[in-house]
Amino acid sequence: MRFRVEEDVFRMFPQFCRGIVMAAGIDNSRQAPELEALLREQEDRVRQDPQIDLATHPRLLAWKDAYRQFGSNPNKFTPSIVFLAKQAKSGKSVRSISPAVDAFNLISIKHLIPCGGDDMDKVEDDLTLGRANSNETFAPIFKPEEIEHPDAGEIIYVNRKTGRVLCRRWNWRNGDFSKLTPETRNLAINVDGMMPAISREEIEQAAEGLKELLARFCGGSVFIHYLDAQNREVEVHF
């Protein structure tokens, strides 16, 4: 499996860094009340922290600005981390879905950065972050029958081999075919940082924190790779 970020993305966002936390042979069907409790703690922390302002926090603004740069309206299509922060601030809890999803939501809220995961047994050959040509196909999560096409130039997470989109507008909405389920055994979770709003050190701390949570609550073998402007591609064998 090849993970890559295309040059066009780094041309627009040279300080972007992606941590890819990969896990093989996990059990994502376990009950994990302790993990859910940790997730609620992070939601409460965001809710009560006056320094986390939805309108001014640099990590939220960085993703709103990124959306505008590739031609998407962040007020209409909300970046995932902005959505999660709004949920926390309004007192709404993220629904607990499975240990792996709870783990990356916890890390996302804790560090105020986007995270998203996919089932590696549903993808062929490559996972690519790049710009859309609008020929790709996308079925929104939990709506597999609704086929749509991304806008030309939109940044998408896509399986170039098949043209199937895993996530539209970078981190706005996940596709259905690669979603994590209790049956997922092999996965990859992206931990995305837009420097300088977040440091490379904290991006790596977030990825390491996610690795620890997955190992603790899902088992299996967990490892991390990083993609940046100097290292745009990595090949991984699950």
Image (cartoon, grey):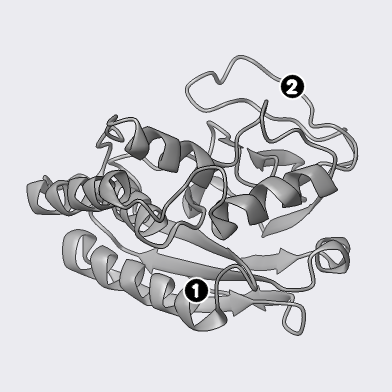
Q: Foreground residue, 20 or 91? A: 91
Quarter location, residue 89: top left
Q: Foreground residue, 45 or 77? A: 45
Which amino acid lies under the numbered mark 1 shown in the image of this protein? Answer: Ile
Give the number of the disc on residue 187.
Answer: none
Q: What residue is disc 1 on?
A: 203
Q: Foreground residue, 145 or 193? A: 193
Asked whether residue 106 appears in the rendered view, the answer is yes
Which amino acid lies under the numbered mark 2 shown in the image of this protein? Answer: Glu
Residue 177 in the image: state x and y as whole percent: 54, 34
Q: How many marks?
A: 2
User: Eyeballing the image, is 227 above or below 52?
Assistant: below
Measure how far apart labels 1 and 2 are at the Cα level.
32 Å
Residue at (44, 67) in percent of width and height: 22
Task: Tell which tag, 1 or 2, sits nearer the viewer.
Answer: 1
Q: SS for tag 1?
A: helix
Q: What residue is disc 2 on?
A: 148
**Number of residues whose C-alpha sits closer than 10 Å to that of mark 2, classed few (under 14), some (14–19) or many (20 or more):** some
Mark earlier in primary sequence (1, 2): 2
Residue at (34, 59) in percent of width and height: 110
Q: Quadrant of the N terminus?
A: bottom right
Residue 155 in the image: state x and y as whole percent: 77, 47
Q: Is residue 83 left or right of residue 40?
A: right
